[in-house]
Amino acid sequence: MNPTAAPDATAWLHQGATLRQQGHTEQALSCYEQALSLPDAPPAAWFNAGNALFDLGRWAAARQRFESCLALPPPLPAELSEAAHLQAARCAVKQGELGAARVHFAAVLRLNPQQFSAWLEAGHVCRTQGATEQMIGAYQHATAAAPQRWEGHLALARGLEDLARWDEAAASYHRALLCTDTAADGPRLRLRQHHQMARWRLERGDAARALEALRAALACLPPPRPDDAAPALGLNEWAELHIDLGEILIRLGLTDEAHRALEQASQATAETTLSRLAELAFRSNLWQEAQAVLRRNVTLHPDSATAHWNLAHALAESWQMEDALAELARAEALAPMPGARSMRASIAGRMGDAATALQLYRELAAEEGPRSKMVSSAAMSTLYCDHLHPAEVAALHRTWFAPLGEGARSPAAFANPRQPERRLRLGLVTADFHHQHPVNIFMQPVLRRLDRQQFECVVYFVGVSYDEQTHLAKQRVDRWVECTTWSDALLAQRIEADGIDVLLDLAGHTSHQRMALFARRAAPVQATFLGYPGSTGVPNMDWIVADAVVAPPEHAPLYSERIARLPHAVFCFAPEADYPFPTLPDAHATRPLTFGSFNNVPKLTPHTLGLWAQVLHAVPGSRLLLKAPSFKDPGAVRRFSEAFQRLGIAPQRLLFRGPTGLADMMAEYADVDIALDPTPYNGGTTTLQALWMGTPVLTRCGHTFVSRMGASFMQAAGLPDWVAHSDADYVAIAQRMAADRPGLLALRRGLRQRLLARPAWDIDRYTADFGALLRHIWGAACT
């Protein structure tokens, strides 16, 4: 372009097109914006600017340009109008505004009823919204508009499989494959088709059929030669296939075979492929393997901010905070990291700095709006904060989540027969039937015993982690629905179609939660249980399951839900694994007394540390053993050691231990004479595990669900004298219990038998009580 001439819009558009073709999208956008600044800018300037913004992932701005193009005075060329509507629809999809997307797709199809992409993509939107008949119709129109395009036939096959119309689905799948028979790259296209179908089937939870499709994909390749790691494909494409194969095999419980597939995938060199492999390894509890993959990724791509970011995230999730912060700094030195504040908030919380975590999450939530996931993160942070009054925590929850209830359905809108005594359909929404998760630990024994004549149990699984416990849970319920990738609208439609009477939330504001689903109401009766130790503040969450200690009647104003109380204790610890009771010889009464806590670091608030320091001062010669995942990080050990030194506790009185396997961790309770419960966030699973292994727990009773769990468990154990009602009381009890070493040892030796004689540890009785509670809350809806 001649810099001395006054460029017109056409020149700017030509220059922009050239730059965009060369991959210089930002510069191309500048040219298009220059064209738009001129009087009477042509419609193409708006359209081309929208395309450049779309390429850059700026969906809202791109959509504004496309819609501005469509709003120009007529006559707008029909071809341009069609293209602008199509691109605006795609932007709306990216923004999650599916209703607006459908409006634009409809406009495209009015202009051109044979527009293949519009029919296909409209079908995808209908599927996401749960509009199944419209989905099938859209896919059928797509195949009629372009019968030679395999993408339409394959999408129709997927939709038909979703509806269990297997014969029709098989026919569409076959038609998709026929479309590639005459193509020069037919084998490669068929591999792509089978691979895509495998992924779709896995997304639906149909691992067996997914394996069939993936094996068909692999069969499209010639057999490997000894010197060729990735025959007929690039190495990274070969690795992608084996990542999916590994995930399918994990879902099928073929763990050894899955690990071999992932080992083959580890030969990859592409950043995105290695990141995906690490993500799968991490959620399959292969933390060390995931970190090794991500470190290799950084070595191969040292100038990639994303590679450093992914490693930082994995380190933070593995409780290696100093290393995570250092890696985050490297990422930020290479490029701006939009999620940096969120990661720093998470790290602050994991380091016990709840106030900083709360501040950062509140800032992010204010910026992102009421539907941001950061709002739930902020809510969770309030439970750890020493400085917030219970009424303030309750008010924040109500205020933050009130917007989620806009447009909610009424319980009366559901057609479920209001018959108190009939068999009930119970739905569980959870991501957490895996490994050592508390939801899994407490729910597995209940699922095993729940009366199937009284309840039909359906799990709506929204998680990403699978192991042998996931498979066990699937065997213990009537139906298991894989819906991790489903929209709330689609999931709500399925729950209603299944006729669920009582829908249980098992997550609250923790990871993979579906609070928006509950806020808009997906069943006539909804309750929260187990996953979140307090009121959710979420509209239309009808009940919270509690007991009389964690939620006494006078605390009702702190709850947005009605309180349904179990008669003995809110949770029942009935481990299905065998944890041998420790041998406790007489020497335990004369060794230095050891206090201990196996709680995660976020619970170790400044108030808690100060309280424990007072206990150590009151019991000379005693020690404190702290065990948590964080304490494999030397930085965490140093920080907490220095914190106790500032409180007058010498380092030699502290013992720090990092993570071990669950069986080894349980055995380590033999080293602890008295467990110290943190405040305000009491131990839950850790307290019950300590008691099971013969270690009594000293707890301070607060004024919220989360700060009264310890009191609930100790009263249920018949040990109310271990419950303090003030800091001074806490220290005095510690001093008194530590002084009677023979009595303490006798209590420890008989503690498990004491528990087994109490109703709160009778899992059969607990399950019956839980069933009666479900009938009670259903009966309340029938009156």
Image (cartoon, rainbow, N blue to C red):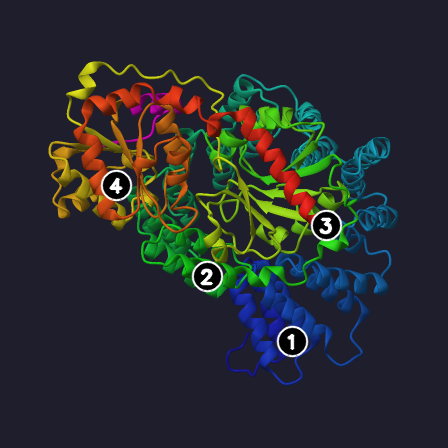
Amino acid type assigned to the residue bearing label 2 in the image: Leu
Amino acid type assigned to the residue bearing label 1 in the image: Thr
Q: Disc 3 vs disc 4: which is toward the camera?
A: 3
C-alpha separation, residue under disc 3 versus residue under disc 2: 32 Å
Q: Which mark is residue 762?
A: none
Of helix, strand and loop, which one carries label 2?
A: helix
Query: Is residue 698 visible from the viewing direction of this image?
Result: no
Comparing 606 with 390, the one in front is: 390
Tags 3 and 4 in contact by the CB under 8 Å rule? no
Residue at which label 3 appears: 783
Q: Which mark is residue 10?
A: 1
Q: Position of residue 322 (x, y in %)?
A: 28, 44
Return the disc, 3 or 1, that comes first in the chain's sequence. Answer: 1
C-alpha separation, residue under disc 4 versus residue under disc 2: 31 Å
Is residue 462 part of the magenta span, yes or no? no
Return the disc, 4 or 2, that comes first in the chain's sequence. Answer: 2
Q: Badge 2: how crowded within 10 Å, few (<14), some, or many (20+)?
A: some
Amino acid type assigned to the residue bearing label 3 in the image: Thr
Q: Badge 1: how crowded within 10 Å, few (<14), some, or many (20+)?
A: some
Q: Which mark is residue 636?
A: 4
Of helix, strand and loop, which one carries label 3?
A: loop
Q: Disc 2 vs disc 1: which is toward the camera?
A: 2
Tags 4 and 2 in contact by the CB under 8 Å rule? no
Residue at which label 2 appears: 396
Query: Is residue 137 rendered to the left or right of residue 388?
Result: right
Q: Which residues are magenta?
A: 655-669
Of helix, strand and loop, which one carries label 1?
A: helix
C-alpha separation, residue under disc 1 versus residue under disc 4: 61 Å
Return the disc, 3 or 2, that comes first in the chain's sequence. Answer: 2
